[in-house]
Image (spheres, coloured by chain):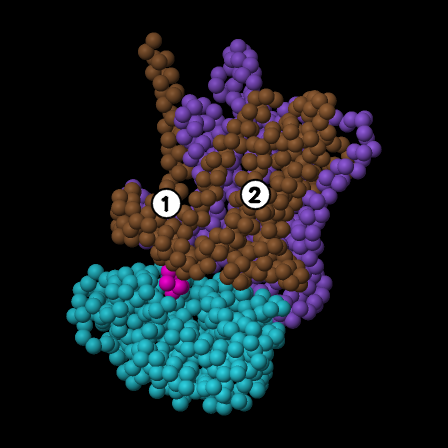
Chain colours: A cyan, B purple, C brown
Amino acid sequence: MKRRLMAATATAALLTAVTACGSGPAESAADGFEGQTLTLWAMDGSTPKQWEKDVRAAFEKKTGAKLKLEVQQWNGIQQKITTALSESEPPDVIEVGNTQTPAYAKTGGLADLGDLRKSIGADWTESVNKSAVYGGKQYAAPWYTVNRTVIYNKRIWAEAGLKGTPRTRAEFFDALDAIEKKTDAEPLYLPGQNWYFFDGLLIGKDAGLVRKQGGKWVSNLSAPEAGEAMKLYAKYASYSDAPKDKDEATPQQAEVFAKGKTGAFIGLGWEAGTAVEANPKIEKDIGYFTIPGESPDKPEGVFLGGSNLAVAAGSEKQELAREFLKIALSDEFEGALAKEGGVIPNKASLQKQVEGNPAAEAAAPAVAGGGLTPLIPQWAAVENPPNPVKRYMTAVLKGTPHAEAAESVEQEINKRLSQEQ
Amino acid sequence: MSVQTHEAPTSARSSPTVTPPGSAPAPGNDGARRRGALPYVLLLPALVATAVFLGWPLVMNGMLSFQNLNMTQLIQHVTEWTGTDNYSRTLGSEDFWRVTLRSILFTVVNVVVIMVGGTLTGLLLARLGPRMRLLLSAGLVLAWAMPVIAATTVYQWLFAQRFGVVNWLLDAAGLHSMADYNWTGGQLSTFFVISLLIVWTSVPFVAVNLYAATTTIPRELYEAAALDGAGAWQGFRTVTLPFLRPFLLVTTFLEVIWIFKAFPHIFAVNEGGPDRLTETLPVYAFVEGVGNQHYGTGAAISVLTILILLALMAYYLRIALKQEEDEQ
Amino acid sequence: MKGPQLGRLRGRLWPNAAALVLFAGFVFPVYWMFSTALKPNSQIISEEPVWFPSSPTFEHFATAVRAEHFWTLVRNSVTVTLLAVGLALLIALFSAFALARMRFRGRKGVILTFMIAQMAPWEVMVIAIYMTVRDADMLNSLVPLTLFYTVMVLPLTILTLRGYVAAVPKELEESAMVDGCGRTQAFRKVIFPLLAPGLMATSLFGFITAWNEFPMVLILNKDAEAQTLPLWLSRFQTAFGDDWGATMAAASLFALPILVLFLYLQRKAVGGLTAGAVKG
């Protein structure tokens, strides 16, 4: 768990000191939660070490309660959260992916956080908060967003005689060609089902994943723009020996990269930490740049992945859960998270915190052109494994024409979009 | 499931080939009244446990299959009866029938391979000298005992696209197009890996028990056959085969059932992929129910799966019960 | 003279050759698991397979064991497995005795019930089981897990043990009773020792079932401290998908107890089996 340590240590130490001063003797007579334990489900990679330590200390000091963090894996998480929300003792606070939040909001399994929005959420970034609102009610608190960048191996790039990083897509392809020709390395590691990268390309082409048809949401995958985005994806994938029918988590692409035989991969900032954990020697070779677009002034479209923090409606610790959110989402800790984790914080005023974090600096220019998956409750079902969009991608990469491949999965997508949740 | 596969020597055991004659319970006249209640008392714990922990979930599963049960209903604990909607939707979907047909084909192919392979291996065991027999038995037992999840992991490694030893061997054998072959990329190749895994874990059971059964064939029968001028093949046909018939019949049906409901093998190798093309009925029920969170539909599929299983079992149960009577 | 001798030699050669090939085929995956686990990464990820781990290392095992809660999971797995098997044997012994030695109304119905129960497709019922356990407020506990595993292995245990009980010569039991033993005592002193191989064989199958079970614990016990080893192995595989050394080490650790138990017990069980058969 050494992830995201890059820039953090000094600031973190400073922040700890601030925390210690902030919660002076006046508050040490905690708020009557002694003996309670708050359970937090956070996804793998979401809670940087120092941040976790500081938030825990602040929370336990303020409330007198204990914090139990249970790190979850993405694989199978939807099913796990659904059943957990139905239980009598659900986890109290749950990190929910932004694309999945509307589905859970609709089930009534998440508590209404309207009060929290009033007290601490006035300046949450509107576009980021959108995914946490369903039917006019606030069902979660926006926590952070992330977007993908190119993570590359400087040593291999130097070996290929490359100087600087590409600013346009064409330059990027030239660089990959150079690596292919001049080194033994695989220019790019891109498995066939890195579907969030594909979503970014779709966003770059302005191709929506769904459209309304007769009052119902239906798949828009067969649109020609989607085909163009996929063509681009295929071009990238042609530089990779990665399996066409696997996503970036099987195997973890960062671990492949860590072996030092890959020129670059497209991933999230924290994945560099995973690579370093697997092979500490790679750390000095890691560099980042924004995924380039058509022209230097407009980077590639990106999927603004992100997470919200929700409170289980069935939790008996509603008060305590809100206390936790107030601490974790305070400017102090939200800023620390942005700084340490290199993620985009939930309010614009904290954006400058990411300065000096190379991953975050590379990610930032693309945010303006970023987008999401459709914010409709039905969408989460489409992403359930086996995700039909991923099937489409594999089919195209194996030579099926775009229209045919899209057609073969659209029925499944439409079925999922029309099913009751 | 290999789990159950392991259990099977027992059924072989309870088949007449192994059970010594004369062990059938003789209805005694002594203390008949005391005995009147005793068997029920002795059976009570087992029956109660089975009723509570198997019977109830079955009933519950049946009830769920008539409900509209998705994320919302599960989370809110609401019961929405929808009559036979789940069934009509399932039975009306092309997918279900395709998967059913696939499950049956999958079962037939694997059972044939297992029974033929297992029988040949068992007969081979009978022909070997003691030392070779011990060696081969040890090998069989190792494969047989391998826990399913460990086995699926190992097979994924054997068939890995990069650095997998199978691809290397094929390449070395001159099939250079196989050097980087992606086994889980296609339907047939994925089924090949799954089937190999299932055959590998199931053949030992058939072989070892078949061998045990052959040891009970009286030598005199062969001698008599030889006197009649029968060769090895005829000896096999006139003596071995008839003697093993009940064993082979029961074993075949056990295998049919185990293969039909095999779950971890298929799910662990490629989760029913690629493109859901290797889903058999149990996997389909799981993916639709738990995976896609349409628990009511999943329950309906699982009820249908159980019904098909029962239909498959009916024949086996009749045979088994008949043997039961013969024993008496 | 020469012809028949050569023929006999060939007749002995091909079964042995076939046996060797089969042996290699059946053992290789197990061998490859252990050998990969022992090889350093450079030998695992090599263009030419390394057939023998010439410089064995235990680093992969260290990685595998380092996982969070590993020892808790080991304890849980062992507890659940032993309890389920013990409980099943105890309950089954009563039933097996009744079914093998007594005649009563409904006997065939009971046998039929257990035969059907033996075939239950547990995996497709996980949601029903989950909702039952959830509504009984027993999630994240080893108790329901133990009980379900007990019932999972119970039918087969009963049907098997019944065969073994039936194989004990009735005369032995009767002569013991003549010697002044009660029915209980006759059972304990005469039948039980004869049943030992049967008990071992049966428990083996129970061990494997309970040790392997996966879909149920996945949905019932979300609390990491209430989980069992199959979950650890599968999670390990997703997390370390490309690290075959560590994955194989984990698989080896998971398989080893069962392999050892099987090799040890199988000999006794088969011994008991053939002995009984010869006697019969």
**Element assignment for label 1:** helix
Q: Residue at x 53, y 73 (%)?
A: A38
Between residue B50 and residue B33, name the one nearer to us.
B33
- The magenta stretch spans residue B211: no
Q: Main secondary structure of the magenta part?
A: loop
Q: Is residue A244 left or right of residue A133?
A: left
Q: Chain of mark 1?
A: C
Mark 2 chain: C
Q: Where residue A369 appears, x then y in whole percent?
A: 38, 83
Q: Which residue is mark 2?
A: C206
| Residue located at (51% from left, 19% from top) | B234
Q: What is the spatial separation of the Cα atoms under label 1 and label 2, in whole angstroms?
A: 25 Å
Which stretch did the figure color magenta?
Answer: A246-252
Residue B266 horizontal/vertical position (percent): 49, 51
Q: Is residue B160 above or below residue C92?
A: below
Residue nearest the viewer, comparing B82 with C233: C233
Q: Is residue A187 visible?
A: no
Residue C180 screen position, x and y as percent: 73, 24
Residue C215 shows up from this direction: yes
| Residue found at x 39% / y 43% | C29
Crowding near the residue tagged with mark 2, few <14, some 14–19, many ≥20 C-alpha atoms within 10 Å: many
Mark 1 belongs to which amino acid?
Answer: Phe
Please indicate whether residue C243 sits to the left or right of residue B307 in the image.
Answer: left
Q: Which mark is residue C34?
A: 1
Name the residue at the top extreme. C1
Q: Is residue C269 left or right of residue B169?
A: right
A393 w.r.t. A60: above or below? above
Residue at coordinates 45% horizontally, 27% vertically from top-left?
B124
Q: Quadrant of the N terminus of chain B?
A: top right
Q: Amino acid at mark 2?
A: Gly
